[in-house]
């Protein structure tokens, strides 16, 4: 059985969705990152970078959400096309989420919600980059039902991980400016697998307070 080291944040949610889509048996192991569990020596043996998610699949350890998506999709032959053209498109959009939308969204969230003092330049820089990436994604989805083409894939699963919480960056407007993206995210969220993935998070009781302990756990290099 797969051991799945999880916290209900965007990157682990991508993996939770794919595991649920594949209907694989797995054991959820909560990692309370607000308490610093990701820095414990035993966890650092699994991921030296001290981040969730991690899976242990039989005797194979995989960390980083997109590495896990690729590992599982390739192993089980689902959600990643074998046709070279479609596969190339899927991988390209998967990496756009990995290197663009994900980190810029993370930085936008940090400076909007976690920074101990306002940094207007940083807020503007990261929010504008998030907007730009959604514009690129919106244009793609205006010409294709899914990011990789005609089939639902790990690229869409990766997008869902961050886009489902876009309101944390854009406020009440959420994805209103990106109706094609919103439509896809809503369609994915309505899938039984997404409902099961969301329930994983709902069943856990983890710390949510942003106090000094949490700041030390999440941003030790800033203290």
Image (spheres, rainbow, N blue to C red):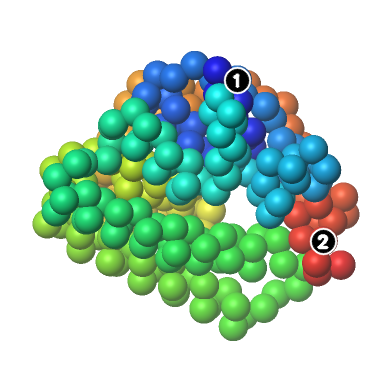
Q: Residue 140, relative to residue 211: is it above or below?
A: below
Number of numbered discs on residues: 2
Which residue is nearer to you in this view: 206 or 76? 76
Determine which quarter of the picture holds residue 7.
Answer: top right
At 21% from the left and 41% from the top, the residue drawn is: 81
> Looking at the image, can residue 106 be seen?
yes
> Percent x, y for residue 167?
48, 52
Question: Which disc number belongs to residue 163?
Answer: none
User: Between disc 2 and disc 1, whose residue precedes?
Assistant: 1
Give the spatial CA distance, label 2 vs label 1.
29 Å
**Badge nearest the viewer, 2 or 1:** 1
Seen at 29% across and 31% down, the residue is: 77
Residue 189 makes an appearance in the image: no
27 displayed left or right of 146 = right
Residue indicated by mark 1:
27
Horizontal and vertical percent position of residue 27: 60, 20
Left or right of 88, for residue 24: right
The foreground one among 58 and 181 is: 58
Residue 136's quadrant in the figure?
Answer: bottom left
The quarter holding residue 43 reads top right
Kindly identify the residue that appears in the image at 76 percent across and 73 percent down. 117
Percent x, y for residue 97?
39, 57
Q: Quadrant of the N terminus?
A: top right
Q: Residue at x 71, y 35 (%)?
A: 31
Residue extending farthest to the front is 59
Secondary element type, mark 1: strand
Which residue is denoted by mark 2 in the rendering? Answer: 220
Extreme-bottom residue of the structure? 121
Instruction: Give the quadrant of the C terminus.
Output: bottom right
Q: Dot 1 surroundings within 10 Å: few (below 14), some, or many (20 or more)?
A: some
Of 184 and 64, the residue lying toward us: 64
């Amino acid at each position: 059985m797969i051991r799945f080291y999880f916290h209900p944040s965007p990157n682990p949610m991508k993996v939770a969705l794919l595991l649920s889509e594949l209907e694989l048996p797995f054991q959820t192991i909560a990692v309370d990152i607000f308490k610093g569990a990701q820095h414990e020596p035993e966890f650092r043996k699994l991921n030296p970078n001290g981040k969730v998610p991690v899976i242990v699949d039989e005797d194979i350890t995989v960390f980083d959400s997109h590495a896990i998506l690729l590992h599982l999709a390739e192993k089980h032959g689902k959600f990643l096309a074998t046709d070279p053209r479609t596969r190339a498109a899927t991988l390209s959009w998967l990496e756009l989420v990995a290197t663009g939308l994900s980190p810029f969204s993370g930085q936008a969230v940090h400076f909007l919600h976690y920074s101990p003092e306002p940094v207007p330049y940083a807020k503007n820089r990261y929010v504008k980059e998030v907007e730009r990436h959604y514009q690129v994604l919106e244009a793609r989805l205006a010409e294709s039902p899914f990011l990789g083409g005609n089939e639902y894939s790990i690229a869409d699963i990766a997008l869902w991980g961050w886009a489902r919480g876009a309101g944390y960056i854009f406020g009440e407007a959420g994805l209103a400016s990106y109706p094609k993206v919103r439509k896809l995210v809503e369609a994915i969220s309505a899938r039984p697998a997404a409902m099961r993935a969301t329930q994983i998070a709902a069943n856990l009781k983890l710390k949510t307070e942003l106090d000094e302990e949490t700041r030390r756990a999440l941003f030790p290099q800033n203290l």
